[in-house]
Amino acid sequence: MKFNKTFKITATALGMLIPLLFLSTFVQSSNLNTPENQEQEEGKSNKAMKLIVIDPGHGGNLPGAKGEFTYEKDIVLQVGKKLKEAIEKEMPGVKAMLTRDSDIDVPFHQRTALANKNHADLFISIHCNSANSDRRVKGKNGRYVTQVIKRPEVSGTETFVCGFNRLQRGESDVAVRENADILMEDNYQENYGGFDPKDPSTYIIFSLMKRTYRDKSIRFATYIQNEYVKKGRPNRGVQELSLAVLASAAMPAVLTEIGFISNPQEEEFMASNKGQEEIVANIVDAIKHYRTSSGMQ
């Protein structure tokens, strides 16, 4: 039965979580961008930074969020390619690798598997946000139809790390939307250890998989947000969410939402060459700051 399966998954996850509570303190998802986190210098590395994996979100028949004249999958691929070029140009000795370089869909677990296989030092997943939502309403003929609720006024950037969250309203919308592509994968339950993106009770599983690199991911995410703010972008902060694309990354990993495609001004900015170059420069500067603070010269 579905209830028994969900109970077993949740009970197992809770059994793993309880000992962890005595080893570390969870940071609340709404307030991670603090001076204490920004200046945290734990675990400095003696090795040089050699490889960064860039993950343009979605792709192929999974376009992601839709704007008035663009799709998320196209914007993030353009930004990803420019970011790869900028990293290799401005950071001699550092290579960058894309999880996709064309309009194809790559399953989440294969994206992080690529980074793990190549021993990447950082994993950066690039996405566009959306404040639009679907609502089922009864039409004049008595049948239910899907109505799109638009919120074009919502704007800003935010960067996520994979961790524990309570899936409150708003936070859950992002997690469910970004994890929804899992359902299009063959054997998705086997690929993600029984995780079901439609079942909030299983989200705790992913939080248990990312404890090792959590602090470093938060620090890197904070640097990214700080660079956005320097250019006057609205700051929605750094947050923890249970995101499938980050869960199994064996290195510091972030998912950065570079703006709201549902906001006409931000869509135009993200689709423009000038806007993409600014976003790329922000991320490159954040990487440089992280590399210096981590001693990875």
Image (spheres, rainbow, N blue to C red):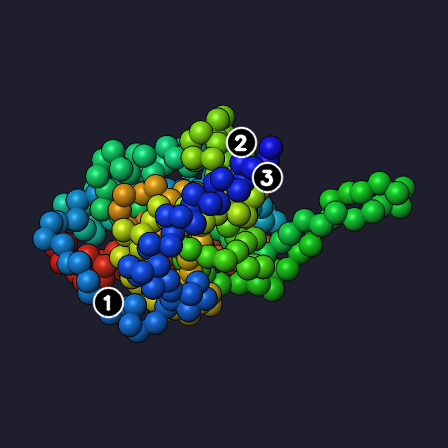
Residue under pointer 2:
184
Q: Position of residue 126 (x, y in %)?
A: 40, 48
Amino acid residing under circle 1: Gln
Q: Real-space Cα distance between discs 3 and 2? A: 23 Å
- Badge 3 vs badge 2, beta-carbon distance below 8 Å: no
Mark toward the viewer: 3 or 2: 3
Q: Tell me which numbered mark, 3 or 2, is placed earlier along the sequence.
A: 3
Amino acid residing under circle 3: Phe
Residue 160 in the figure: left or right of residue 180: left
**In the depicted view, which residue is nearer to us: 258 or 134?**
134
Q: Is residue 151 visible?
A: yes
Residue under pointer 1:
40
Q: Tell me which numbered mark, 2 or 1, is placed earlier along the sequence.
A: 1
Residue under pointer 3:
3
Residue at horizontal 62%, vertical 60%? 152
- Badge 1 vs badge 3, beta-carbon distance below 8 Å: no
Q: Tell me which numbered mark, 1 or 3, is placed earlier along the sequence.
A: 3
Q: Is residue 277 visible?
A: no
Q: Is residue 114 above or below residue 258?
A: above
Mark 2 surroundings: few (<14), some (14-19) or many (≥20) residues within 10 A = few
Disc 3 is placed on an element classified as helix
Residue at horizontal 38%, vertical 54%? 18
Q: Position of residue 29 (x, y in %)?
A: 44, 63
Residue at horizontal 49%, vertical 39%? 8
Picture quarter with the N terminus: top right
**In the depicted view, which residue is nearer to us: 51 or 264?**
51
Mark 1 surroundings: few (<14), some (14-19) or many (≥20) residues within 10 A = some
Q: Is residue 165 above or below residue 79?
A: below
Disc 2 is placed on an element classified as helix
Picture quarter with the C terminus: bottom left
User: As drawn, which residue projects farthest toward the bottom?
Assistant: 35
